[in-house]
Structures are given as C-alpha cells and as structure tokens.
Amino acid sequence: MQYTTVGRTGVQVSPLCFGTMSFGSEADEQASADMFHRARELGINFFDTADVYGGGRSEEILGKLVSDSRDEVVIASKVFYPTGADINAQGLSRRHIVRAVEASLKRLDTEWIDFYFVHAFDEHTPIEESLRALDDLQRQGKILHPAVSNWAAWQIATAQGISAKEGLARFELIEPMYNLVKRQAEVEILPLAQAENMGVITYSPLGAGLLTGKYGAGKRPESGRLVDNARYADRYDVESDLTTADRFTAFAQESGIKPATLAVAWAMSHPAVTAPITGARNLEQLEDSLAALDVGMTAELRDEISALSPTPAPATDRTEVLKPHWT
C-alpha cells in the first residue's frame, strides 16, 4: 500500500480511512473486530470516530481494538454534538471541549488523539474561544492536530486567519461530505485545502448507500440507511440524485466494477482528497469499499464518471474567461 501525507503534518496515512460510526450500534463488537482486523490486514492505519457514535461505544470498541497497536494507527475523533442532557454538554465552548476530550481519551484508552475535529460550526461560541481551547490541548499533548468538519469554506478560512494572527494551532485536516451526488466541496472547500496545504478526509463516499446499486428511480431495498433513517432519507431524497444513481449503476456494470467499489475509488481520486472515509455494518459490505484500493482510476475514467452528475457552479458564478481591462 502506498501511504500519503496529511497536509503539512508529516503524518503518513493509508489512502482509505476506516470510519467506525457503526461500531456499537449497527455493528456489534464481533462484527466491529472483524472489520477492524480486515482493514489492518490490508495496511489501513487511519481510523475515524466521534464521541457521539454509538453513544460513545464506537470510541470504546475502537480503543480496545487498538490497544496492542496504538503507536501504529492514526485516530481521529470529534466534539460538538450533545453527549448528555445538560445544556452545556454540547457545542464548542472551552468548557465542553475540555470535558469532551477527557471523556474521549478515557473511552479510547489512549493518551492522545491524533486529529481532533470540531464536528460542526457553533454559532454561539466565538471561533477564537474554540481555537484557544484546541491550542491548549495540543500544547498539553492530548491532541496532536486540530481538525474541522462540516464548516463552510469561509468559516474555515476565517479560523485559519485567526490562528495565523494569534499564533494558535491551526486546522490541519478537513472532513467534508463528498460523493458523486454531493459535490459542493469541489467549489471552495477542496480548493481551500489545496491552497492551504490541509489534509482532507471525505465522508459518505457511497451517499449513504445510494451509490451501491441498490437504489434508483423507483428502486429501493426493503431496508437500508436511506429507508430506515429519516435524516439520510431526507438528505438524498432528490429525484436528480436517484437519476444519477441509475446512470452510475449502469456505468459501473458496463465497466465490470461493483458500484460501491467504483464510488469509493472516484472519491479517492480527487487530487485534494487524502483519504475517503469508508465504513460498513459488516465485513461483507466493507469488502466492496476496500476493493477501491485496487481500481486503476485514470483521469479519463474519473471524467466519465463525473459527467454522470451535474458539476456544481463555480464560487463566483462566472464561467467565461475574463481578461484584464487593459488588454
């Protein structure tokens, strides 16, 4: 396996990041262990979790699984969403960040978290307050690098400017949604990452199952994330997305590659992407995503796949070539 560097950190990671959101919820401990060991067998050393996944069980299970290989793996976890009934058990206040990281360290049974994500934007807390808390945690060695997920590009850029001005630890890794039907990250977030030399791990490369071949216009399984989970059903309940899923499934079948495999390989092939996050409920599901490591994704093949869905409008909404007025 060829490893890649996370931005400017020097940290070497596998080109696939294994997401453990299913640990302790959709996947029991045995299924979680089976998937973890299969990922390690292939050389995957990057694992993504969060304090709210499985009500904390994801971190606990992952902590047990890495107990004999902690120095060999890179772990990312997150803070923001409610972890209790108290009004302050959420958000990005210094109070919650400091308490949340201690709880995550305990569940993971580790002394440090490699990449610690702010999981969403907190409109009630100044960005400076959150950044200073993360900087303190880095200085204490409890986290190695701050990271950011689900923020708009302007919010990330603002934070990077504050970090530079105040001499605070900056975000080194971004985690946006990115797949063939959700390509908004191409407009500003991925270019920002390239310009600022930040790593990128993208989530939902399969569109919550939409791009596995099981869904399409008038086609859906009896059960699945898009059927059983209202949040995901709402996110992808768009006719154009189902049409894209149909086109993509047909293209994958013509190419002789499983749709799930090709979807992950496509997300992996963007030059700004360090590693897509792939997860599953069981080992059988996971194998299709892991097979993306063996897909020979050429520029031509990526372009063919990209043409199956609408390209998002540029950030400036100007597509013509502009020339300086003096020429």
Image (cartoon, helix red, strand yellow):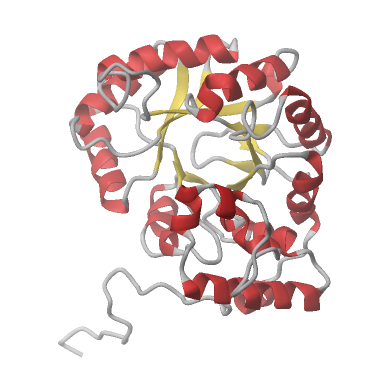
Question: In the rendered image, is residue 76 in sight?
Answer: yes
| Location of the N terminus (image quadrant) | top right
Q: Height in image: 223 above or below 259?
A: above
Q: Nearer the viewer, residue 76 or 217?
A: 217
Q: Nearer the viewer, residue 102 or 32?
A: 32
| Location of the C terminus (image quadrant) | bottom left
Q: Nearer the viewer, residue 268 or 180?
A: 180
Task: Give the x, y percent position of residue 68.
Answer: 75, 13
Task: Give the x, y percent position of residue 269.
Answer: 63, 60
Farthest front residue in view? 222
Quadrant for residue 265, please give it: bottom right
Name which residue lies at 70% across and 65% down. Answer: 213
Name which residue lies at 36% across and 74% down. Answer: 313
Question: In the rendered image, is residue 306 in sight?
Answer: no
Name which residue lies at 63% across and 35% down. Answer: 22
Q: Height in image: 98 above or below 232?
A: above
Q: Image check: 249 left or right of 53? A: right
Task: Give the x, y percent position of residue 321.
Answer: 31, 86
Name which residue lies at 48% across and 74% down. Answer: 239
Q: Height in image: 271 above or below 325?
A: above
Q: Image check: 181 left or right of 249? A: left
Task: Give the x, y percent position of residue 13.
Answer: 64, 37
